[in-house]
Amino acid sequence: MEQADRSATFDLIRGLADPDSGGPERDGMSYALQRLGDPRAVEPLTRIGRDPSGAIEVRCAALTVLESTGMCPEGSELRAWWNDGDDLVRACVLRQAQRTEADLLEPVARDPRHRLHKHAMIGLEFSFEEPRWQGYKIQGLDHPDPRVRKTAADVLCWDEPVAAEPALHRVAVDSDSDAACAAIDTLRYYHSRATLRLLHEIGRGDSERAVTARASEAGLLSEFQGEHSTIREWIAPVADLLGSPEPATSTARPRLRHQPPPVPSAAEILETYSDPDGPWAPKLTMLRRYAWPRVPAADRPAIATLLSAHPDPEVREASCGMLATWHEVDALLALTDDPNCAVRKSAVYSLRFVPMSPEIATLTWNLLTSGEVASTRGYEALATCAAHTPPGDLDDRLIDLARTDLRESIRAEAISQLGDRVEPLLHLLAEPPLVTWSVHVRLLDACRSAGMHVPDLTPLREVDNLHLALALADFEARA
């Protein structure tokens, strides 16, 4: 399976669908299909997964492949699954829901008694970053079912809302070991002295949660190893508990002789990527290694046409960087409307690197204000919009975003794009964090770079957060 040989796809699907296959055998076939990621498997796996008369184990295995490979439907087709499906299919819809399906997700996420509540929690992990969504995740930490508490702890790893930390501390000492370990693992991303102290206390002993706590403590500390005086001062109140960190073991590998990336011809690309069978792992690896800038101009149109319309979404996604390199704007614009979310994300990101265009500025601004994107997709869309807007023309809108938008990533990116023009936003430094301290950190960084005076920062010095402490120290050192 290391080579992802797709000539095995249909034999694996037949084996997966065989009700006489044993559990471990079926799990092995499901895993193999996940490694293959063959788009030709979508139709038969969808048929198996949506068949209400099929065996539950077989249907679950088929849906798992679709979910793990990012080949579940989106938009109207996903809604059709919801409208026509039983609980097994609806659970899949909730796990795969995007912001365009928020109306399906929210009633289930809001109701802790709903039979599919845990699946709604899973669906909230990415891109649902506004405070109300964070509230649903945090409430999940107090759910009577330990499986839901574990799920809530898992999903709170991504956005790191400040408000979740006390509840994660409670679950870290939960009676259920799985829930506790999930909370402990997530806490490695909550950079406070209170969390460090808790992890250190839990880490005494040989239990599973103690082992997890020691790993989380080490992971948290590893981000801040160094001689920065602020780190030493910040960590001083818990230094007596933590002791001296063990020196990291070098994992450096011997240097390999550099091999220049190959320059493909159109004939080679057409022969290699037109064949749906055979080992695909090397093909996808090479797609990201080719020296696209050195491809002769005469070969580019055929390559761009094939790869940008390829049936494999991984190929279309990987082609976006190539298209940007060649300034194939029309092909990239078409991919911003691709059926696959990962392809759309890559296309919007890659458009940042083509010549300035009012059309791209409008497209990305409209995408941003539609509410369809948040988190990474959101700030990448804003950065692309800024790259295609004359300097200063976006300032009023950026200030409004930083003041009023409920998407934390958008607010932070707006501040970064404003640079030294953040004076209208300095009042935000006196306000509590909406989700995290990232807005305050970005403002302090901008003020430091611009040499701007900032009102009284005393309240921020009392905050137990290393990122904010470092931003304050850097600001005050260079003010």
Image (tube, rainbow, N blue to C red):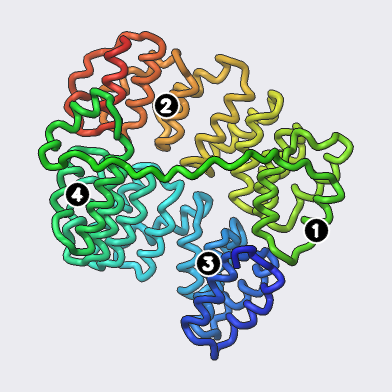
| Element under disc 4 | helix
> Mark 2 or mark 3: which comes first in sequence?
3
Instruction: Judge from the rendering whether residue 389 lies leftward or rightward of residue 416; answer left or right.
Output: right
| Element under disc 3 | helix
Amino acid, disc 4: Leu
> Mark 4 or mark 1: which comes first in sequence?
4
The Cα atoms of the two marked residues, 2 and 4, are separated by: 34 Å
Amino acid, disc 3: Trp
| Element under disc 2 | helix
Locate the N terminus and report the quarter of the image it occupies.
bottom right
Q: Which residue is mark 1?
A: 274
The Cα atoms of the two marked residues, 4 and 3, are separated by: 41 Å
Q: Which residue is mark 3?
A: 82
> Mark 2 or mark 4: which comes first in sequence?
4
Locate the C terminus and report the quarter of the image it occupies.
top left
Spot occupied by residue 131 in the image (x, y as percentages of width and height) = 34, 42
